[in-house]
Amino acid sequence: MTTNIKFAKQIKKKPDSGHYSLGGEELDWISCRENFAKIFNQHQKGLFFSHEPNYEERIFAFIEKTEEILVRAALQNINKSKFYKTNLNFATWIEPSSFWMKCPMKRSLFTMLLRCGSFYNFKNYEEALYSIQYSQSTKKALQRFLYGFTEFQLKNESFEGIGKGWVSYFANKDCNVICEKLKPPADYLSDVKFLFGEEVLWA
């Protein structure tokens, strides 16, 4: 986490944890991830995220751990996301790496992972990863993604409108659907095969 402080203005009632804002003269918070996705595009530099007071370090550590896992899994160079404390102890400014920003599906996943990070105690990564209903319902897709299969295959689908994000595509889907949608990137270097239960999820 950087030592620079990002200034934000908050006059209205403090938001609950897990809300998002693009900033502005005053923070305007959005609670729904799908509504936020309509304005959070690849041209944005970053976002504000609300959390319990002084939880920014655990959220930062969780995302940092996630990015380290991805680097080890696919042997890819992934530039790190940047986290900034703000003058508000319940809000953090985050500049996601280009890895997350270039794809709407990854941006959707990133906003979900921020919420998971609030449950991280620096030791319980897997517990925090599946700490919310959205991540529990997409567990197999998360596992495949974290093994380096990070490229989402968009066919005739559209990301426009409500219901087009990570959870909508992967909640309670079987392995065939997950493997069809999540593919290795072009520079994927790992030749390791992984098994999940009796099904080949990673091949």
Image (spheres, helix red, strand yellow):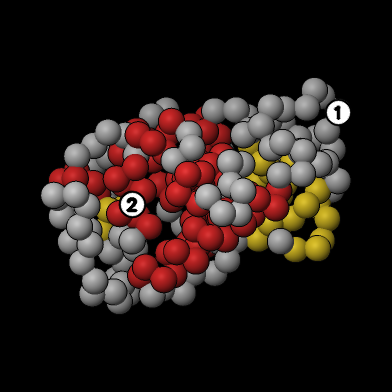
Q: Which residue is mark 2?
A: 143
Q: Is residue 46 visible?
A: no
Q: Which residue is mark 1?
A: 11
Q: Residue furthest front?
A: 123
In the image, residue 105 above or below residue 9: below
Asked if residue 73 lies left or right of residue 13, the reply is left
Image quarter in which the C terminus is found? bottom left
* Residue at 65% in and 46% down: 47
Q: CA distance from mark 1 to mark 2?
A: 40 Å
Check disc 1 and give the amino acid type.
Ile
Of circles 1 and 2, the one toward us is: 2
Q: Position of residue 68 (x, y in %)?
A: 50, 66
Residue 48, quarter of the rendered image: top right
Q: Position of residue 113 (x, y in %)?
A: 51, 45
* Residue at 53% in and 60% down: 65
- Classify mark 1: residues with Cα within 10 Å, few (<14), some (14-19) or many (20+): few
* Secondary structure found at label 1: loop
